[in-house]
Each structure stands twice: as structure tokens, then as C-alpha cells.
Image (cartoon, grey):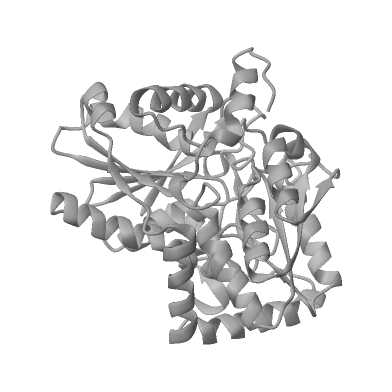
Amino acid sequence: MPESKGRFGIHGGQYIPETLMNAVIELERAYDHYKNDPDFNRELTELFNSYAGRPSLLYYAEKLTRELGGAKIYLKREDLNHTGSHKINNVLGQALLAKKMGKTRLIAETGAGQHGVATATAAALLDMECVVFMGEEDTKRQALNVYRMKLLGSEVIPVRTGTATLKDAVSEAMREWTSRIDDTHYCLGSVMGPHPFPTIVRDFQAVISREARAQILEAEGRLPDAVIACVGGGSNAIGSFYHFIPDESVKLIGCEAAGRGIDTFETAATVNTGRLGIFHGMKSYFCQDEYGQIAPVYSISAGLDYPGIGPEHAHLHDIGRAEYVPVTDEAAVNAFEYLSRTEGIIPAIESAHAVAYAMKLAPTLDKDKIIIITISGRGDKDCAAIARYRGEDIYE
């Protein structure tokens, strides 16, 4: 659990302008009340089960296991959720909380577009106005998700500042929240930002590991040897890890987007290349240039090219409880194609980073070992981009 004011070791905190303090305090008080409210939790569980399609499956990937020739591999199928990713877990929780707080408008940032789609979906369901900020570069490589958000009734604002990607969308959403606090809730999509966001998002995403832990005990009669998930800001990974953290026999492995390699400037592998800093309201590790400025980052995955990592992940790294490994574009694309052909499951390119590392790890382990990989989302949104990466120009 976080220490005072959302500190995870030395990480976290509330590094925000005075203009946002009242909004953050209001959110913290509301969450502290509703997280223990039986009616709120009953309503959220009903939304999870009847609307989002939870619990998600824990699928034994028999063919993948056989072909890799090592540990048994299970896939936690967050791609089967409504809207196609884990993002709906957090969004339904935050949107319901915002509604209880009397807010009528949601704003959000998005990279790959899945958080934006989930927020637009929840806004439509709960009859709320919705505005999504998305880097202009990401609107081009995720055009399908832009259309989905607009179809759901949301406004999508392309952000042209900076690198025109996820970090700039976050900055713009925070500016917007500052200017319109009374009726607006910022539905932040990852375990980052000022307290209480890292805790709120973690708690709503922890349903992943709560289910997976019970499911693997039922299927195998014991806990897994490793849980593997991709990491950008880190919401699906912390959700996948959380209920396994006390189980020291379970290795927790986060897979960062190495882009074209951690020995290049075209990478987003924060733990492997970053340094301690303060950005977007939190203290954590960030990719920085020689002057301490936030560095431009790159990944083929729009959802992982964020220059920082959530404070709880930074703390798990510091204490050695979780390991964070870099995975290149090429390895992720190979895994994207391999899982599609092997199991008939097209993963999000974000999730493919975790699959790629599992493809290396599984053959080194004995056949009595067990790995769980979180498939954080489905890959429909990435097919055109991966085709272009392979030299085939196709329409969305």
C-alpha cells in the first residue's frame, strides 16, 4: 500500500500546481469514501460482469506451450473485455466515481486509443460529455480508434505540441482539467500522475490478478512461477502483479518498449535507460536528456511510448520485487505474428512485448513450471501499422 500521500518508497507524491490541489483533494476524499461503500462496489461489480464481460478467461495456450517446449503458458485474456482491452476496468470505476461526485464531463488522454475508446464508451453509457486528447502522431497510426471514439459521441482533440504523442496528450489533459474543475473529472488511464491516481487506477485494475490468482489455483492447484505483462505507464502490469506481490515465489516481469534498442535514442524503456525525476505530478523514473529534460521516446507501440513509469513500479524495481526487461520493436512484431499463427489470437502490439519475452523465457524453464502472460488488448487496431512495418501498405 502507498505510504503517506501516495508515496511508494521515494516515488509518487503530489507535484502539482495550486490550481489542481482542490480537485485532487476532492477526488481523494471521494475515493476514500466510495472504495468501501457496498452500493458503489455492488454497482461496479455489476458493470464488470454484465457490461464489460468479466471475469476474463485464463486460457491454457497448449499449442504455444508445445511449440516453445518449456514451461506451461497461460494467457490472461483482457483482450476479450468489452472495447478490447484492460482499459475498461479502470474507466468504469473512475466514471462511476465521477458520477457519484456530481461530475457531468470526462476528459482523458490516450496513446494507442484504447483508453480513449473505453472512456468514450463509459461516457456514452453513463450519459456524460467526453473529450479525449490524443497526440497527432498517434491519431494517424491509430485512425480506427479515433473513429470509434467519435462514433461513441466523444470529441477527439489532436495534440500537436512536443512529440505529438502520449506524454503531450497527458500534459494537455492536465491543462484542460485545471481550467474546468467544477464539472469535469480527469479519467487518467495509467498508474501515474499525482496521488491518488496511481492508487485508484491500481485498485480498479487489480481485478486482473485477483481473478488470475483464483483461476490458476483452480486450474493447476498452485501459483504460477512467473507473471509477465507489458509496461508503459504500467496499469495492466500493476493490475496483473498486485495480488501476487505477497507471493515471493512468483516472479513479476514487466516488459518495456525498447523501440530500436536501449543503446539508441529511439527507445521508451524507462527503467532500463531512465533516471529519477519529477514529471506529470509524480516522482519516478523518466527518460531524460543530458540536461534533465524529458527526452523524446519512441516505440512502434503507441500505448507504450511514454517517457516514465508509474511510481509503484519504480518502487517494485527498487526493492527487487519486480524485474523490468526491454523488448525491441522487431521482437514484439515477431511475437505479434507468432501468437496469431500459433493460437489464433491476435494480441495488441503492446501485449506482444510480453509475449516476446515469454517466448525467450519459456524454453529455458522445466515443463513443470507455469507462466501467465497478460494479453492486455486485442490487435485489430495494430494490423495496418504492422503491415506497414513489414512493407505492405493496406487501408485501415
Residue 139 position by quadrant: top right
Tell me if residue 396 can be seen: yes
Q: Can you say whether 295 is above or below 121 in the image? A: above
Query: Residue at left 44%, top 64%?
Result: 50
Left-right relation of 10 to 307 = left
Quadrant in the picture for the C terminus: top right
Left-right relation of 91 to 73 = right
- Between 274 and 107, the residue placed more toward the observer is 107
Residue 304 position by quadrant: top right
Residue 184 placement (x, y as % from top left): 76, 73
Q: Can you say whether 129 is above or below 72 in the image? A: below
Query: Residue at left 65%, top 68%?
Result: 194
Left-right relation of 267 to 166 = left
Residue 61 placement (x, y as % from top left): 28, 35
Query: Residue at left 81%, top 56%?
Result: 172
Residue 118 placement (x, y as % from top left): 61, 55
Query: Residue at left 57%, top 77%?
Result: 5
Tell me if residue 11 can be seen: no
- Between 185 and 265, the residue placed more toward the observer is 185
- Between 246 and 358, the residue placed more toward the observer is 358
Quadrant in the picture for the N terminus: bottom left
